């Protein structure tokens, strides 16, 4: 892919990376604060078993979101590295060209649709 063609994708990836870094930081703060004391100095420990279950569910969900966004950040870093190496837009599996429509939808994808489907099916 030509440098001029790659530029909008690089900009998109940099914006996405900055947003996700902020999201992960916010989620980490939320997960940590849910285990601390209340704002008014009272204890954050729920007084009812159902409240404890809800709090645990929310904390687990926050941690899961952090993990998912962390994985996406790793993929974005990989895409930025592929741009620097001049191989962005080429499938890492078959070396074929990844269509621009796919890159617009998932700018950090390292695989064409066919290879992504095959890799996903092989995991099951």
Image (cartoon, rainbow, N blue to C red):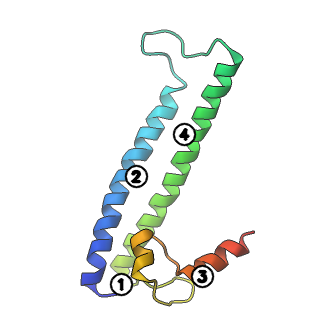
In three-dimensional space, the C-alpha distance between marks 2 and 4, rounded to whole angstroms, equals 14 Å
Q: Which residue is mark 4?
A: 62
Q: Which residue is mark 1?
A: 86
Asked if residue 107 can be seen in this view, the reply is no
| Disc 4 packing (10 Å; few <14; some 14–19; many ≥20) | some
Left or right of residue 79, residue 55 in this image: right
| Disc 3 packing (10 Å; few <14; some 14–19; many ≥20) | some
Q: Earlier in the sequence, mark 2 or mark 4?
A: 2
Residue drawn at 59 percent across, 77 percent down:
116
Above or below, 116 against 2 in this view is above
Above or below, 75 against 93 in this view is above
Left or right of residue 60, residue 77 in this image: left
In three-dimensional space, the C-alpha distance between marks 3 and 2, rounded to whole angstroms, equals 26 Å
Task: Tell me where residue 48 appears, x and y as whole percent.
Answer: 67, 14
Contact? badges 4 and 1 (CB < 8 Å): no
Q: Earlier in the sequence, mark 1 or mark 2?
A: 2
Q: Secondary structure at mark 1?
A: loop
């Amino acid at each position: 892919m030509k440098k001029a063609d790659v530029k909008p994708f690089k900009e998109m990836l940099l914006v996405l990376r900055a947003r996700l870094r902020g999201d992960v930081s916010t989620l980490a703060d939320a997960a940590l604060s849910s285990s601390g004391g209340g704002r008014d100095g009272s204890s954050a420990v729920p007084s009812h078993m159902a409240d404890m279950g809800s709090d645990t569910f929310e904390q687990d969900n926050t941690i899961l979101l952090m993990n998912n966004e962390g994985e996406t950040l790793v993929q974005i870093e990989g895409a930025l590295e592929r741009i620097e190496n001049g191989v962005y837009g080429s499938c890492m599996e078959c070396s074929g060209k990844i269509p621009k429509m796919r890159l617009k939808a998932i700018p950090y994808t390292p695989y064409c649709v066919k290879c992504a489907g095959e890799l996903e099916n092989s995991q099951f």
